[in-house]
Image: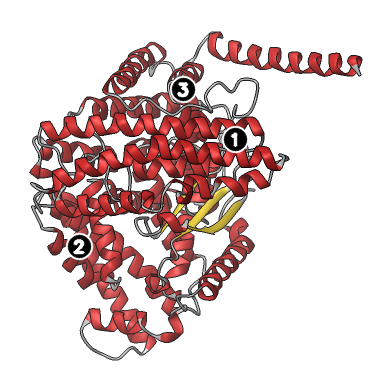
């Protein structure tokens, strides 16, 4: 037995030495641009325990020093990250761009743009999400989601670290409260309707007491999956409950008091123009989100033009469907309210929706090789948004797999109210969020070889969301709507939704539209329910500029594809185009344009096939 123990300890020591050796080489080896970028990634990741957990590489190993901690949310913490970003950008100039070729040149361009945006955003007196706690994001929502979804409980030690992270969460809530107070002192406060929704979410989280918070109710089932005695399980649950009661609930209560006080003087204006420096901030967010130099006025006009085009196409499809003539919105509503398109708002109806989505996945998988050279190696799961988050969550979203493969990619759908998703809208949601949308794009990025880790995990919104919307249109080209006119109407409705985003986002933040004006405009164009539109419009208030990334990204990818077709003629291969777009990872749109231009040039010079 002692010999066996010695052998096992020796093997562990060898593993530790090997890992440390790899890390040491990785960090101190002679550096080109790729290894320099990896060193910067290590420096930045070591400043963020949560980023390390999200990467999922060293959790629950001998190198795990972070799993009992959460990030630093203080101003000093932000200043440290800004200093790191500035140093990273300055250091990058020592390795390029002169003399670089291939993937190293591409890495330099992508990293330079990424670091530049990080520095600009960090230097802004307004946070990237200007209201640190709102109805859809901030630590009161993201904190519980991280603890319940990202922290992996695989042993007693990892469960004990989870309890320690609950205590840490109380510290985080206090730090963010101080930041909200500092924002308030310089005139940055949410509008009244954002405060109301944020307060509702905070009350909902704590009103049932510590034992009924999701931090505790999701903990016990996870303990059942690991080998622990009943006494250990009971103690861990009790410790978690006590930690929530002593640290988390007081943190929420203090924030509630602060937000109730802010509500007394809050205004109803929706746009970010209402806070000091808001107009300049919005111009910067549009640049960061779209990775273009388009102005708010230009984006507004693009949105109006796209909405007019899509309305004409939707009208033509409804004519083919035999929808009775009438006002545009009334015709769309008649399709949405067709009982054949609605699932019962019951558990059985929700399960029927999930089954339908899984069938779409099977159908797409059967055709995927005809359109893509490389397919994701990572698994895809289709699951519902957790019930505790569904009232404030987006309708559907995707979380990528961990780099180590321990966590699959997941497509989440919000099933709070099945009327939000008639059957004719579900296919397009799946193609955007899952396949060939975000699952293909984000999984592909993780599989890019010989590139710095940033290129595997960072993707500008204009690229990733642009690809998602492009994927919706691609599904039409792949033939999935040939016998499904209602589904094709749903596809166009989704495209209309993204076009109207351009209009209302710029409308509220640059044209000084009201929240109600934005809701009315989207209702007149999309056919979505008023409740769903309200959630979306209020999202744009909380995240200025982000919604503009989708349509601008899609239009750019389509423009580049048409340019490639025109230039390459018979040499154009849609599978090869998708490979070039996806298998270099996410990047700013202006860099993508350079990549496709080079691909076209290489294709022109290549010999024709025998």
- Residue 41 got which mark? 3
Q: Would you name the residue on which mark 2 appears?
A: 305
- Numbered label attached to residue 85: none
Neighbour tally class for label 1: few under 14, some 14-19, many 20 plus, Cα within 10 Å: many
Q: Nearer the viewer, mark 1 or mark 3?
A: 1
Q: Is residue 67 visible?
A: yes
User: How far apart are the two marked residues, 2 and 1, measured between alpha carbons?
Assistant: 54 Å
Q: Quadrant of residue 352?
A: bottom right
Look at the image and tell me whether residue 589 can be seen.
no
**Mark nearer the N terminus (1 vs 3):** 3
Disc 2: CA contacts within 10 A as few (<14), some (14-19) or many (>=20): some
Q: Secondary structure at mark 2?
A: helix
The answer to which image quadrant residue 532 occupies is bottom left
Q: Which residue is mark 1?
A: 159
Query: Nearest the camera: 149 or 171?
Result: 171
Q: Looking at the image, which residue is at 55% across and 58% down?
A: 382
Q: Give above or below for 78 relative to 150.
A: above
**Other residues around mark 3 within 10 Å, as few (<14) / some (14–19) / many (≥20):** some
Secondary structure under tag 3 reads: helix
- Where residue 444 sits: x, y (%)? 54, 42
Judge from the rendering whether residue 37 lies leftward or rightward of residue 304; answer left or right. Answer: right
Mark 1 element type? helix
Residue 137, placed above or below residue 280: below
């Amino acid at each position: 037995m002692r010999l066996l123990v010695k052998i096992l300890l020796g093997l562990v020591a060898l593993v530790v030495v090997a890992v440390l050796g790899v890390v040491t080489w990785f960090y101190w080896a002679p550096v080109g641009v790729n290894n320099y970028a990896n060193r910067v990634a290590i420096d930045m990741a070591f400043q963020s325990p949560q980023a390390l957990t999200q990467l999922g590489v060293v959790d629950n190993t001998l190198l795990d020093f972070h799993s009992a901690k959460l990030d630093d949310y203080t101003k000093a913490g932000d200043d440290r990250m800004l200093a790191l970003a500035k140093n990273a950008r300055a250091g990058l100039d020592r390795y390029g761009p002169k003399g670089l070729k291939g993937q190293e040149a591409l890495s330099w361009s992508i990293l330079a743009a990424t670091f530049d945006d990080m520095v600009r955003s960090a230097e802004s007196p307004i946070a990237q999400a200007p209201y640190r706690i709102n109805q859809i994001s901030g630590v009161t929502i993201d904190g519980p989601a991280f603890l319940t979804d990202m922290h992996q409980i695989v042993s007693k030690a990892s469960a004990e670290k989870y309890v320690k992270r609950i205590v840490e969460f109380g510290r985080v809530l206090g730090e963010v409260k101080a930041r909200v107070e500092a924002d308030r002192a310089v005139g940055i406060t949410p509008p009244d309707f954002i405060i109301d929704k944020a307060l509702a979410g905070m009350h909902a989280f704590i009103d049932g007491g510590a034992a009924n918070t999701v931090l505790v109710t999701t903990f016990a089932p996870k303990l059942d999956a690991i080998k622990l005695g009943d006494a250990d399980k009971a103690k861990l649950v009790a410790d978690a409950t006590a930690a929530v009661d002593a640290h988390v609930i007081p943190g929420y209560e203090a924030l509630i008091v602060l937000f109730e006080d802010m509500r007394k003087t809050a205004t109803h204006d929706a746009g970010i123009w209402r806070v000091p420096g808001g107009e300049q901030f919005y111009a910067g967010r549009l640049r960061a989100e779209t990775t273009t130099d388009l102005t708010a006025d230009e984006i507004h006009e693009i949105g109006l033009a796209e909405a007019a085009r899509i309305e004409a196409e939707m009208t033509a499809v409804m004519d083919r469907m035999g929808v009775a003539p009438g006002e545009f919105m009334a015709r769309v509503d008649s399709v949405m309210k067709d009982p054949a398109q609605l699932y019962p708002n019951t558990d059985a109806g929700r399960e029927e929706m999930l089954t339908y989505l899984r069938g779409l996945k099977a159908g797409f998988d059967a055709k995927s090789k005809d359109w893509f050279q490389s397919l994701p190696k990572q698994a895809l799961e289709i699951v519902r948004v957790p019930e505790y988050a569904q009232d404030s969550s987006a309708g559907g979203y995707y979380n990528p797999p961990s780099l180590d493969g321990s966590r699959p990619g997941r497509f989440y759908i919000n099933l709070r109210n099945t009327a939000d998703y008639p059957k004719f809208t579900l296919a397009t949601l799946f193609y955007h969020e899952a396949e060939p949308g975000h699952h293909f794009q984000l999984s592909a990025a993780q599989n890019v070889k010989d590139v710095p880790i940033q290129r595997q995990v960072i993707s500008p919104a204009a690229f990733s969301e642009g690809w998602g919307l492009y994927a919706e249109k691609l599904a039409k080209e792949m033939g999935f709507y040939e016998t499904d006119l209602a589904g094709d109407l749903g596809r166009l409705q989704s495209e209309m939704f993204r076009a109207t985003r351009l209009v209302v986002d710029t409308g509220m933040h640059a044209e000084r539209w009201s929240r109600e004006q934005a809701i009315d405009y989207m209702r007149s164009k999309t056919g979505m329910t008023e409740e769903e539109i309200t959630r979306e419009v209020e999202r744009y208030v909380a995240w200025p500029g982000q919604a503009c990334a989708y349509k601008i990204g899609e239009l750019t990818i389509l423009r580049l594809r048409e340019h490639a077709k025109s230039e390459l003629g018979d040499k154009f291969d849609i599978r090869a185009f998708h490979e070039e777009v996806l298998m270099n990872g996410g990047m700013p749109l202006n860099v993508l344009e350079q990549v496709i231009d080079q691909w076209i040039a290489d294709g022109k010079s290549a010999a024709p096939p025998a």
